[in-house]
Image (tube, grey):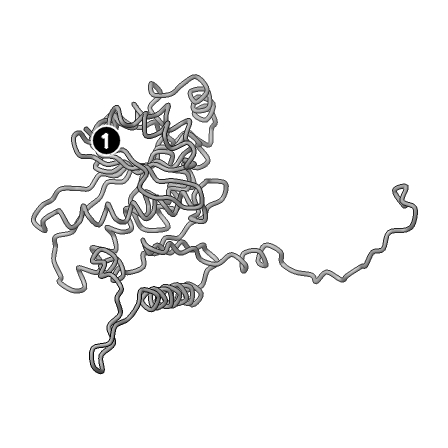
Amino acid sequence: YTFHCPSNPRFKVDDVPDLDWIQHVQESWNPILTRESKFVLRFPWHEDQLVMKSCQEMEMEKMQEAMKKQFSSGVKREGAVVHFEGDDDEAGSLKSHREYVQIQLEGGIAFGTGEHPTTRLCLDWVRDKVELQLENTDDDDDGTIRFVDYGAGSGVLGIAAAAVVRDHNQIKGRKQPSDTKKSITTVGVEIDADAIHIADDNAKKNNVEMKNYLPDIESLDGEALSVVLRAMQRKRNQGIQTLPEELNGPMYDLCAANILAAPLVNLSPVIASLVKSPGGEIGLSGVLSTQSASVVEAYSEFFDDVKVAGEDGGWVLITGKRK
């Protein structure tokens, strides 16, 4: 059949190799590394050797870029000594000594596998803020960090927060054995029941405690309420609960929400009601740079110093501190 063409189209037939296409696709999907926060997001088919290679390549790339920056900033000679004129960045130096934190994910249909700029922005914020909380807590202080991941998806942000504390305790325990350990309570809130199953499973795989819940019914608009009610009626979702009263209040030191701009604006009173007042902090993304003004305005009613704190590929991270 010529499809009414004036002449027969030219074509070529190639032999397609008989492959296990699932394995073929998986092998092309390398571990995902975040540059500054040093999270390694790996999937079940990733061997340790591949993860190690990816980390080495990342460090080599960062080393080469640092050398280029030093040379481009200029040099000066004093006798036989050459000095680079690069800036001494104390914060950057501290981050360079971070250990990689590994997270294993089974993303499935849940959003949040680390590839998207918004996830990377939030992961950087999570590590900075959780480490700051750890530094500001005395060894004798039994205060628990409280973290809520609103719109948890795969649970990656909450798991990341818990994993930072997990690894902190392991590293400190090797250097200075002690019965005193830092602790974190991590909670996920998600409207998608399938994502809740995935997030709970991901938390178990990473040996961290993170329980995921449906939102409080009273906080939902009509459309979201219908989604949650339908999910609760399905037999396979019988074990899923809505956010219990003891976890539904202004108790969280940190709240990450990687959703979209419009839902974030609508949820501003709800998210504010979960963050400790004063001083609790938010890290919001899923927002394009062109949408940032509306989100900043909505959260400025409840938070101080609400601002765009980072940008990646046209997407932004918005931060603030509870009034």
Quadrant in which residue 252 is drawn: top left
| Image location of residue 198, percent across then percent down | 43, 41
323 left or right, relative to 310: left
Q: Secondary structure at mark 1?
A: loop
For the point 20% across and 42% down, the residue is 145
Q: Quadrant of the rendered structure where residue 179 is?
A: bottom left
Q: Where is 320 relative to 77, above or below? A: above
Quarter the N terminus occupies: top right
Label 1 belongs to which residue? 275
Q: Visible in this render: residue 109?
A: yes
Q: Quadrant of residue 302?
A: top left
Q: Residue furthest left?
A: 140
Which residue appears farthest toward the bottom when viewing the image?
A: 80
Residue 149 location (% of width, % of height)? 32, 37
Q: Nearer the viewer, residue 161 or 104?
A: 161
Against 112, residue 58 (above or below) is: below
Q: Say which amino acid is labelled 1.
A: Val
Q: Residues within 10 Å of mark 1 (few under 14, many from 20)?
A: many
